[in-house]
Image (spheres, rainbow, N blue to C red):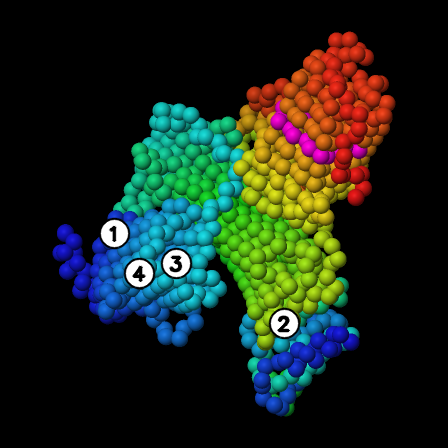
Amino acid sequence: MAWWLALFILLAAGPARAAEPAILAGRLLDGQGQPVAGAEVLLYDSAQVKRPADFISPPTAADGRFRLQVPAGRYWAVAFWRRAGSRVGPLAPGDRHSGEPRIVDLAPGQESAIELQVLDLQEAARLSQKRGAETVQVSGRVLDAAGQPVAMAYVLGHRQPTWQGLPAYLSPWTGPDGRFLLHLPAGRLFLGASRQFPPPAMTLRQELVLSTDQEELELVVAGPAPGEAPAAGHDDEEP
Amino acid sequence: MGFPGLLLALLALLALPGAALARVLAEDALWQGTVELPEDLLVPAGRTLTIAAGTQVLVEPADSTRIDPEYLAHGTEIAVRGRLRILGTADQPVRFLLASAGDRERWAGLVVDGGSLEAAGAVIRDAEAGVQVQAGSASLAGVVVEACRYGVVGLGPRAELTLSHSAIRDNDYGLLLLAGAQAREEELTLAGNRRRDRLFRPAVPVPVEPPAPQPAGLAERPLARVYGDEALVGETLWQGRILVQGTVRVPADSRLVILPGTLVEVARRDTNGDGYGENGLSIQGLLVAKGTPHAPIVFRSAEPHRQQGDWDAINILGSDQGDNLVEFCRIEDAFRGLHFHFSTVTVRGSRLANCLRGMQFQESLVTVRDSLFLGNTSALQARDSEVLLAGNHFLDNGQGVNVFRLGLTAAGNLFAGNLGDGLRIREGVSRLFGNTLAGNRSGLVMADARYAVLQGNLLAANHEAGLTLRSCDHLEVSGNAMLGNGLAGINLADVRAEIRGNLVTDNGERGLAIQSFAGRISGNNLAANGLYAIGIEASSDIDATGNWWGGLDPATVIYDGADEAGLGRVLVEPPAPAALPFTWPVARVPCDSTWRGAVRLEQRVTVPAGVTLTLAAGTTVTYPRPATLAVHGLLAARGGPAARIRFQAGGEAGPDDWDMLYFEHGNGSVLSEVDFVAGSWAIHSHLTDLAVTGCRFLDNRGGIRFHGGPLAVRGSLFAGNGIGLRAFRGLASVEGSAFVANEIGVFVREKGKRLALHDNNFLDNRRYAFRMGDFAEDDVAAGHNYWGAAGPGASIFDGASEPGIGRVLYEPVRLEPVAMTLARTP
């Protein structure tokens, strides 16, 4: 009831337009072309759509259709579908949005049709991929022999288990959580970890054939940190 | 060529009506007649632009102009690093006007950054800031600044303004002197500015750990190699000391690896006379600069007197087939420290300082962690990229971070003391968690953005607003603290958002200033803001139910349609009946701050040296899990008889030796009318001059545990604790207090000769009223105390009980208890 009252207020508060109303009708579809029920179409009287809408449709029916009577004129239309049923606030993960506003010109006394596609919020908002198209992202942790994360270590990768000079691929130093992230070309690679840079001569024992991103890889680094001081004793509880 | 001759030579080019202008003033110049300014103009160091009487400067406004580091503003500007002389008169003033009459846009204005402006007889209008000085001097005589957003702005202690016989009027804001800027005023008219005629804000100290010093002996290192203009093909390894005297190029499929401890010095070469060096690195292959904390790699100017812009940049272009690494590097004195396009770059543990711009990039995949951007003209500018910023410090730059259309995740960063905005975001999708923005001109400005999440950030003591949102859609703003900002905690214009669970207190004018808003404002604490908790300029109603209004009638702290016809109403019913629990979102209190309401601590929170944390009367600090408020600065907690402050534990059980309040050199701290309830140690104090008056310590493992001092306890109650007061090598006076029903009232661990306890009551303590420890060899002065009807007797354990330890010198004994105003329950 309150919802319809709000709609009424919105309608009543709408900008002055031609007296004869127009009809906007249409259908909302999801990414697979299936009708979306319970969505709303919001109409704005300017391209500025980051504000309260001038008109809001009733929720779409089971067939995704809606129908809205408004004063004739030019409008900018967007559509939302919310999973949780909330009507304000930010869209939540899983909610859908129609993206950039669609301009619709509604003539007096006539009915115009529109079809909008509402997509998952994250998909709609996703920016263009900045990563090199042929690289694979490999992430995980560097651990010591006891399975504890190692800070100030890094992962190195090479096409062969050994190398001359320096290995081809080097990750950043790890932080206290031992985590690393490395961008590598697809294909067969050998990986290892070190705490020294440049790395000492070693044989890379972890063999991977990379075609997709890999997560939670664990690599063990051998030996103590260079120049590592002996562990400090615990202070007495005083003072 | 001398100046007169130069004038004649340039006159023909520059004094013609409608003459278009170059971006950088290449020679000294004179303007007269009508001059069009279609784009930004830089008056570089060493150059003078003179504008003759009667000149009209017609400016084309632009929303977004040059992104090059030498320009400071977003609109069309005249940037002055050299000298700008305006020689108007009362009869023939120099006028700065918009080229298009009736245009609602503004131009940026005159921006002095390291140069000087001498202006007489001028009219400056329609600018974002008529005159802005952030380094250098501006002298205005007989100048009118009007119809601007800001009339005259001084930013920072290096801004010197002299304002005489001038008028700053009919702007939104008149004269702003921020972050310690000073102005000499004589016959200055400041009137009719719509929002404020004057705003003065001193610099806000935000103490941080000092940056590590430069590695020793850099300059003495032997030179390993000198490079000119050349390409490094294949794999190149740098170590030792490298001198770059040209542009060193690393072609595609090649790699430059720089070992820890390497010093790279770049010689200055300025062939185009713009004041900035052109030498540097150009990477199209891969860069691996892998320093370590103890052996950083240093990139800096090779000049004996190193200056900003001595060299160009580490440029990386189209390098996205591997990871470019810039780790534990120090990049100084550059035009742009790091500059890259279409690349994958990780920066970690590095310092970018004294550059015109620390970092600039676009179309890249970027991680920047644990790095320091210090004292650059602008810290970081980026667009169209995917970026993680984590644990970085952006300190004392001209501009902080300015990004456009990023997929941005920013967590745990500190943006402080920047003369412009701490963080400015336009478009893109942003997720901001646990960042601190303090003491900037504005904290966070976000425009034209969607789906952003701002969660658990602190925006404090920024000179204007903490958070400004313009034209944003579908935002979540939750769990943030907006404290003590100069004007508003939150500015909203054309925004749809969920604003919930924030702490918005002690802002200079408005908690929330709303021009247009759709969404909900709920579950926030809105208290002690200068003018209003919420002030709206919108005609639509605002949903603001379930907020706490500082214990006041909401109508008294709201400006809406009830105050001005035509405005919407702020719908507050039902309000929250009491302060809503707010979890302090970051691990530090970065600058002087006040807590009020109900603050929860879920982690160790530090008040660093140089910072004062004030707890307002009636504040409650709760510990849902063991956590500590660690005070190295100053804590001022003064409750009142009807509004006591309360520290209370509850929730998770934890180790039995955590401290609610920990002091270390927190000298001058004051606790009065404060209750500590059910904690482990209520107070653990080291070497701190601390005054405790009228406090209650109830049912804690321990009340006060201290080392050193001096500690002064007056009129306090220690009841139901394991130990009321524990002294270790302490200096303290304790008087007018009661130790009741503790396991042990007072325990002296060691060296008690500097303790004095008198006129206290010791009653019903279960094991001992007073116990000397096994290493407490000194006697303790404890005369004139009341020990109960039975006297001290067995309630004292000291040298009389165990030879070799000190005595409690309890004589003379009070025969009547001290009158106490504090009871265990009110």
Q: Where's residue B708, x and y in %?
A: 63, 24
Q: Residue B152: give its label.
A: 3
Residue at 49% over, 34% down: B211
Q: Do we see residue A214 in this rendering?
A: no
Asked if the residue at tag 3 contacts the one at tag 4, i.e. Cβ–Cβ closer than 8 Å, the answer is no
The residue to which callout 4 is attached is B165
Q: Residue furthest top?
A: B803
Q: B796 above or below B699?
A: above
Dots 2 and 3 on the same chain: yes
Q: Which residue is mark 1?
A: B47
Front of the two marks 1 and 2: 2
The disc placed on residue B364 is: none
Looking at marks 1 and 3 on the same chain, the residue that comes earlier in the sequence is marked by: 1
Marks 2 and 3: which is nearer the front? 2
Find numbered disc 2 in the image and state the secondary structure of the residue it sits on: loop
Q: Position of residue A179 (x, y in %)?
A: 63, 37
Residue B562 disc label? 2
Residues at marks 1 and 4 touching, judged by CB atoms closer than 8 Å: no
Q: Are marks 2 and 4 in contact (CB under 8 Å)?
A: no
Q: CA distance from mark 1 to mark 4?
A: 27 Å
